[in-house]
Image: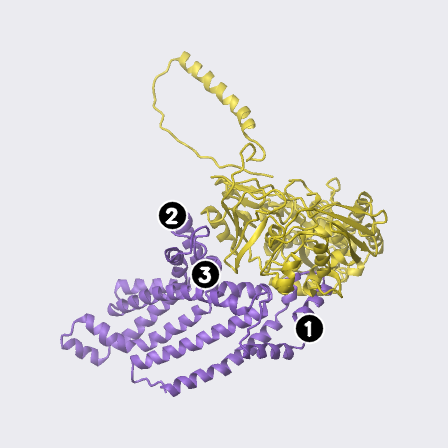
Chain colours: A yellow, B purple
């Protein structure tokens, strides 16, 4: 986490007067001695985090300048991470990711489940629930509420089923066979096979295991929850005026540590320059996705610029059905030709991390910084082209979007890569599309004439790698839109998916990452460091190492 | 007159029908659909989601269902916001109307005055300067002008707010609204003001060369009366027409201005609805703005016939 306070330069007029040599030496010694102690004092005056030692102040309204309208606030049926940042405040889940720990990766902890137990075969999970928890509508939380919510997502013949929720959370519940209430505060879920990433999936965006008030579902129906989001979270819903504001207030009946803030206003500010200006003029206290070129200015003005590892990877899906990229040497040539460090510095002002540790994400268990591959090496790239029979290079097409969720600056980044590849003889034609048009194309999979399709994705768990590269997920069925078919890789990933022992699963995923990276199935390019910019008066915010968090522990200084 | 108005109002029906068909088809032809926008997850989940949204039905069935609901006064529910389209659009339309009234008042005041003064002193330095400035006004993109105004007045001088309709932590008072309206209204007014200034100038020039103006002047009628009473009245029809057109465009939402200033109008909503392929919202928006456009033009035509009795509405 980084933060920097601004400083002010004072100038004063010096009067010129005569001094003796003795006076000069004496004064010099005093000034020199004083100056020498400054670093010592500064070191002690620089606590981390910067609000350490200050007592939290209760009250106030925090304004968060969000990059988009958060949309419908049903916790089981939203897509963007931006929506998760709002929904997280209203709903608790069985399990969640502790975004206030400041750790990378952030640990998964029980929230409405005090703890959980997995059977030795990894097929049964028993959740022991928290007692004395109330929903915002005053009703009690219990095991029946958990069963209803899980059935809303998963059970085809349940009266609670919401087909739209099923489309968002299917991956989490794909192997669940039953949900049984053992007593008022104990629930057991049975799976048809072990699933090593089951708990991380439940905690993902707090989505699949978020608990809505059953009374609210009965009263407003599945469709109505979007306008009546009633959960057990630290904040209650007040109002949502589309494109203007979403207002939350502190829930006084919260079971856990109550928020210091009276209210949180989420204000959609879609224009990046307008977001920065809103922060500078005090009309927003926190903004996300600031333009990279605003970084130095905002830091110099005293704003807190936080960035760090998150679960993100910006990558190129090389097309294995393309005449060139079915050859491993040509895939590796692309990997060596890209100057990731230059791209991170010159295009994104060091708001990203060069992706040099394989096809994975910084907060996933398979992340291993001791493994480094594909540093920029144009000579090696040319050598591989020569070896593959293309001494003069070749022409190909790379596709990307003009903007979009997690896409950073796709076109300037792609142009930088285009120049890198031209240096080794590969001529790239860039085709860019409007975001949703591109996602539509992307789901269909890369056609043979396209060399690569760019995308960005990420989770804090590794099952996502199987979605990207397992042959059973070949597009248009799944996300493997570069048509990777590697039986050895499939076998390792299959073993990792069903391995109940976390340590063993981690080793298997790391093995898969090394193999896939060596084979250059995908070109990892950069990892977003997700800058968040805070006004100097915002205290208590810890960089979450995730794309979502709550403002529960945040307070506003006067 | 009544017959004419009824005829024009009846013509709204085929116009709206044509517009609805074109919008419906165009939104469906765009690659990527509402389901992709909502979930952006695996294709298998997309199919499930499409079915739940009714997007798996044949196009003519989807269209028929939508029209059937409209006939019953129901524009449907927003896919993204899961609220009735009318409930979302109407308050936002009021916000756009406020912006439109503000910017059109400004544009009419500046555009008409500048046009009249320029025509009055043709080929003077002021006239040439005005024509150059209006050229800039017409060419200036709203997103650029808006950002410059925000930077100067909100950030550098800290005089005026640069985002939203009201202070985010304050009360929703008329005073707050007016202060927040200044910069967006200036941004939106730039192009219409410039167009109206040029149109007013050329229309006035045509009129003040007429014999009757020379006669009035020869009679010693004061110049102010000549210009405002006799010349302007006859120059008004084309100016009114262009004003009506600009008004119609602005009622459709000044998208760039609304995005830059985070003004919660229908332009900003259209931007996010198209981006999210929120079909019912986009279709509802197009119906509403088409209706406004047609009605504004009808009002302008009636006004023109009053201003210049030679032009009969029938």
Seen from this angle, which residue lies furthest top?
Answer: A22
Q: Which mark is residue B257?
A: 3
Dot placed on the residue nearer the N-terminal end, 2 or 3: 2
Does the residue at mark 1 contact the one at mark 2 (Cβ under 8 Å)? no
Instruction: Read off the residue under disc 1.
Output: B56
Element at label 1: loop
Q: Which residue is mark 2?
A: B157
Label 1 – label 3 distance at C-alpha:
36 Å
Q: Is residue A127 above or below residue B67?
A: above
SS class, disc 2: loop
Give the camera-side residue of A139 and B17: A139
Q: Is residue A411 visible?
A: yes
Q: Is residue B147 left or right of residue A39?
A: left
Report whether A180 appears left or right of A70. Answer: right
Label 2 chain ID = B
Q: Secondary structure at mark 3?
A: helix
On screen, A420 above or below B36? above
């Amino acid at each position: 986490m980084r933060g920097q306070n601004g400083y002010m330069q004072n100038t004063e007029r010096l009067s010129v007067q005569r001094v003796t040599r003795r006076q000069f030496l004496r004064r010099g010694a005093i000034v020199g001695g004083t100056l020498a102690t400054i670093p010592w004092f500064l070191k002690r005056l620089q606590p981390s985090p910067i609000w350490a030692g200050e007592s939290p102040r209760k009250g106030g309204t925090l304004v968060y300048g969000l990059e988009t309208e958060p949309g419908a606030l049903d916790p089981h049926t939203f897509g963007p991470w931006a929506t998760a940042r709002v929904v997280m405040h209203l709903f608790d889940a069985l399990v969640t990711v502790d975004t206030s720990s400041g750790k990378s990766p952030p640990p998964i902890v029980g929230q409405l489940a005090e703890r959980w137990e997995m059977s030795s075969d990894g097929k049964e999970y028993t959740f022991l629930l928290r007692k004395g928890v109330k929903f915002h509508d005053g009703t009690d939380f219990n095991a029946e509420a958990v069963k209803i919510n899980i059935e809303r997502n998963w059970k085809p013949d349940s009266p609670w089923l919401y087909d739209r929720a099923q489309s968002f959370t299917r991956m989490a519940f794909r192997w669940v066979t039953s949900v049984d209430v053992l007593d008022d505060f104990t629930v057991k879920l049975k799976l048809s096979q072990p699933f090593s990433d089951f708990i991380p999936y439940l905690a993902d965006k707090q989505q699949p295991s978020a608990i809505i008030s059953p009374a609210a579902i009965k009263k407003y129906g599945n469709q109505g929850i979007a306008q009546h989001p009633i959960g057990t979270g630290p904040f209650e819903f007040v109002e949502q005026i589309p494109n203007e504001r979403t207002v939350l207030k502190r829930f006084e009946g919260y079971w856990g540590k109550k928020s210091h803030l009276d209210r949180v206003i989420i204000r959609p500010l879609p224009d990046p320059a307008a977001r920065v200006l809103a922060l500078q003029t005090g009309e927003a206290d926190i903004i996300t996705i600031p333009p990279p070129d605003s970084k130095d200015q905002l830091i110099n003005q005293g704003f807190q610029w936080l960035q760090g590892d998150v679960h993100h990877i910006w990558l190129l899906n090389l097309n294995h059905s393309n005449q060139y990229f079915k050859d491993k040497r040509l895939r590796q040539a692309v990997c060596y030709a890209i100057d990731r460090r230059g791209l991170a510095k010159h295009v994104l002002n060091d708001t990203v991390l060069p992706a040099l540790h394989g096809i994975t994400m910084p907060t996933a268990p398979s992340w291993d910084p001791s493994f480094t591959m594909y540093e920029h090496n144009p000579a090696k790239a040319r050598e591989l082209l020569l070896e593959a029979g293309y001494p003069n290079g070749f022409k190909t097409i790379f596709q990307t979007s003009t903007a979009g969720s997690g896409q950073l600056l796709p076109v300037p980044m792609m142009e930088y890569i285009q120049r890198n590849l031209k240096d080794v003889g590969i001529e790239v034609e860039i085709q860019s599309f409007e975001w949703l048009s591109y996602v539509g194309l992307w789901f269909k999979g890369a056609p043979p004439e396209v060399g690569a399709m760019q995308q960005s994705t990420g989770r804090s768990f590794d099952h996502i790698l199987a979605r990207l590269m397992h042959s059973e997920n070949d597009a248009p069925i799944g996300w493997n839109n570069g048509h990777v078919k590697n039986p050895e890789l499939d076998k390792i990933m299959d073993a990792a998916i069903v391995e109940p022992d976390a340590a063993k699963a981690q080793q298997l995923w790391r093995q898969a990452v090394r193999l896939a990276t060596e084979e250059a199935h995908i070109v990892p390019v950069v990892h977003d460091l997700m800058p968040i910019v805070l006004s100097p008066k915002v205290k208590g915010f810890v960089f979450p190492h995730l794309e979502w968090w709550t403002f529960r522990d945040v307070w506003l200084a006067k | 007159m009544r017959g004419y108005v009824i005829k024009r109002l009846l013509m709204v029906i085929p116009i709206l029908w044509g517009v609805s068909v074109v919008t419906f088809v165009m939104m469906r032809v765009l690659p990527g659909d509402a389901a992709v926008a909502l979930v952006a997850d695996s294709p298998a989940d997309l199919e499930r989601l499409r079915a739940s949204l009714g997007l798996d039905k044949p196009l003519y069935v989807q269209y028929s269902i939508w029209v059937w609901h409209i006939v019953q006064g129901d524009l449907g529910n927003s896919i993204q916001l899961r609220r009735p389209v009318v409930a979302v659009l109407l308050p936002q339309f009021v916000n756009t109307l406020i912006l439109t009234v503000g910017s059109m008042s400004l544009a009419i005041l500046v555009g008409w005055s500048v046009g009249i003064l320029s025509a009055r002193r043709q080929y003077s330095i002021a006239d040439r300067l005005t024509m150059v400035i209006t050229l800039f006004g017409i060419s200036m993109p709203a997103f650029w002008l808006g950002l410059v105004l925000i930077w100067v007045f909100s950030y550098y001088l800290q005089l005026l707010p640069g985002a939203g309709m009201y202070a985010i932590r304050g009360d929703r008072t008329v005073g707050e609204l007016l202060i927040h309206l200044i910069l967006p209204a200036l941004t939106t007014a730039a192009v219409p003001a410039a167009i109206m200034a040029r149109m007013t100038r050329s229309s006035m020039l045509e009129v003040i060369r007429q014999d009757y103006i020379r006669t009035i002047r020869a009679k010693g009628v004061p110049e102010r009366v000549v210009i405002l009473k006799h010349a302007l009245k006859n120059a008004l029809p084309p100016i009114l027409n262009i004003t009506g057109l600009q008004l119609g465009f602005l009622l459709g939402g000044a998208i760039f201005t609304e995005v830059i200033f985070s003004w919660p109008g229908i332009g900003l909503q259209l931007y996010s609805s198209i981006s999210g392929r929120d079909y019912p919202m986009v279709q509802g928006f197009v119906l509403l703005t088409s209706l406004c456009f047609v009605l504004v033009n009808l009002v302008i035509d009636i006004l023109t016939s009053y201003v210049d009795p030679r032009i009969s509405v029938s």
